[in-house]
Image (cartoon, rainbow, N blue to C red):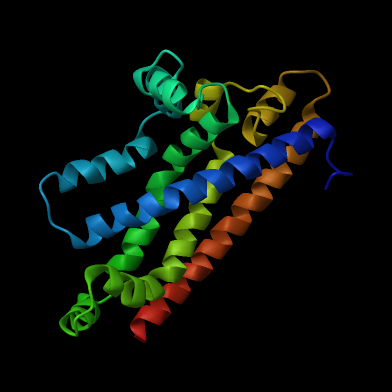
């Protein structure tokens, strides 16, 4: 790939992979917890939580990025606290791209995992609980193995979404070559300069291949999850 892509293009691909992997890995535990809460628990504010989880899907990405800039910028309340406490700066850094991509991908992850959990018969979990297993043990030994294909499918979809995130990312961290310029922002930048169409086209091919592979893998895992639960 390094021979086919130029240095700046390869930097964008490598950074996109880095951002998408971190965004998926860091959001996965919270995604599983949120999906389980929405699928299995009844509590006040459940509808509000569901709406907040899906809000990034309906808000313009630029709005999400601007909200992140207000809250996590160096002058924002959370951004200033993170910098003073942990020395962590998010705005205009690749770490901020991870946050933006993770937030935009979170709804897809939660939805896929929630559907997998809802497909599991609660009686299986109740049977394990009656045998003395704790709630955590029931989840680890009964629920998790049954939802694993759906969990992987959700993670794959989130990864693909994080790879393709543009609006929130460019608003929050800009598009600094080699630092915050991911594939989508690099494509946009190449299209603004004469002779950049070839570089943009190569990055489009990479992005399309990743997205197509993610969708195919996600669909295959979802079907496998349905067959596995049906045979449980």
**Position of 33 relative to 106 (above/below):** below
- Name which quarter of the figure residue 173 lies in: top right
* 74 vs 112, nearest the viewer: 74
**Position of 109 relative to 197 (above/below):** below
**Rendered location of residue 124, percent (x, y):** 24, 81
**Position of 98 relative to 129 (above/below):** above
**Rendered location of residue 28, percent (x, y):** 43, 53
Name, please, the residue furthest toward the front.
85
Name, please, the residue furthest toward the left.
44
- Name which quarter of the figure residue 199 lies in: top right
The residue at the point 27 percent across, 39 percent down is 52
- Name which quarter of the figure residue 51 lies in: top left
Quarter that holds the C terminus: bottom left
* 41 vs 216, nearest the viewer: 41
Q: Is residue 23 visible?
A: yes
Name, please, the residue furthest toward the top.
75
The residue at the point 54 percent across, 49 percent down is 159
Number of marks present in the image shown: 0
| 202 left or right, relative to 207 | right
| 28 left or right, relative to 11 | left
| 99 left or right, relative to 128 | right
The residue at the point 35 percent across, 66 percent down is 116
**Rendered location of residue 128, percent (x, y):** 23, 81
Q: Is residue 119 visible?
A: no
């Amino acid at each position: 790939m390094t021979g086919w892509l130029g240095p700046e293009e390869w930097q964008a691909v490598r950074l996109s992979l880095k951002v998408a992997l971190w965004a998926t890995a860091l959001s996965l535990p919270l995604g599983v917890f949120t999906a389980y809460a929405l699928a299995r628990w009844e509590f006040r504010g459940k509808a509000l939580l569901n709406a907040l989880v899906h809000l990034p899907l309906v808000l313009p990405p630029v709005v999400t990025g601007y909200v992140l800039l207000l809250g996590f910028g160096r002058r924002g309340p959370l951004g200033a606290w993170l910098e003073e406490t942990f020395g962590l700066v998010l705005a205009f850094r690749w770490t901020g791209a991870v946050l933006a991509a993770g937030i935009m991908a979170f709804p897809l992850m939660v939805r896929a995992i929630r559907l997998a959990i809802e497909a599991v018969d609660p009686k299986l979990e109740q049977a394990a609980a009656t045998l003395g297993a704790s709630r955590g043990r029931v989840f680890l030994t009964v629920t998790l193995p049954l939802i694993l294909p759906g969990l992987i499918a959700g993670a794959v979809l989130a990864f693909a979404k994080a790879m393709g995130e543009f609006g929130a990312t460019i608003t929050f961290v800009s598009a600094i070559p080699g630092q915050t310029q991911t594939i989508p922002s690099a494509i946009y930048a190449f299209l603004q300069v004469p002779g950049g169409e070839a570089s943009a086209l190569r990055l489009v091919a990479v992005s399309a291949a990743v997205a197509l592979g993610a969708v195919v893998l996600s669909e295959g895992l979802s079907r496998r999850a349905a067959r596995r639960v049906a045979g449980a």
